[in-house]
Amino acid sequence: MRATAFELVTPKSGTPVARWEVDAENEIHMQFLDNRSKVRLSFGIHCDGQAFLSMNGTDGKNRIELALDQFDKPSLAMSDERWQGRLALGFVAPDTIPYGNWDEWGILFRQFGSGIPVVGLGTMNISGGRTKAFLRILGKNIR
């Protein structure tokens, strides 16, 4: 059997409760729906080949996103109903690609309406196998 989508439905009403599909953007995902047919949980593989897990609120907006970047570095993003990505935890990617030996991990709190962190706390490996901690508030390093 071959198909681009499968749907799981309830036995009595035939209401969809889950989908497994390849969408128009070639993303492969399995979605679980609530009783109002809103996607609450989705996991799969983005069109670039990276895995993801996403949980949505009752309004359908993303609240939690667990993903791997193109170099398989993990991150966890948390959001609320007003702004996506308010908190990020995991690998902190630099502005340039490829990363090389970049090894910064932390937790970032973002300002409402912005992707720029207001507060960041984490660690980075530096030469000689040593680790350095960082605390940044409003873009300034605190010692």
Image (tube, rainbow, N blue to C red):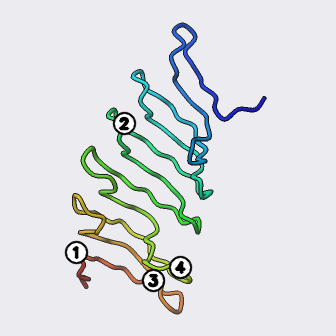
| Disc 1 target residue | 137
Who's the residue at 44% across and 77% down the image? 94
> Which numbered mark, 3 or 2, is in the foreground of this view?
2
Residue 99 - label:
4
Instruction: Please report whichever mark, 2 or 4, sits nearer to the chain's N-terminal start.
Output: 2
Quadrant of res 114: bottom left
- Mark 4 to mark 3: distance in Å? 18 Å
| Residue type at tag 3 | Thr
Residue 131 - label:
3
| Residue type at tag 1 | Ile
Badge 1: few (under 14), some or many (20 or more) residues near its Cα, within 10 Å?
few
| Residue type at tag 4 | Tyr
Return the residue found at the far front: 24
Return the residue found at the far top: 12
Who's the residue at 56% across and 48% down the image? 25
- Decide if residue 71 is on the left or right side of residue 83: right
Instruction: Please report whichever mark, 1 or 3, sits nearer to the chain's N-terminal start.
Output: 3
- Mark 2 to mark 1: distance in Å? 32 Å
| Residue type at tag 2 | Gly
Please determine whether, in this image, residue 125 is positioned above or below residue 70. Answer: below
| Disc 2 target residue | 60
- Along the line of sight, the residue nearer the viewer: 13 or 75: 13
| For the residues bearing labels 4 and 3, Cβ distance under 8 angstroms | no
**Callout 2 secondary element:** loop
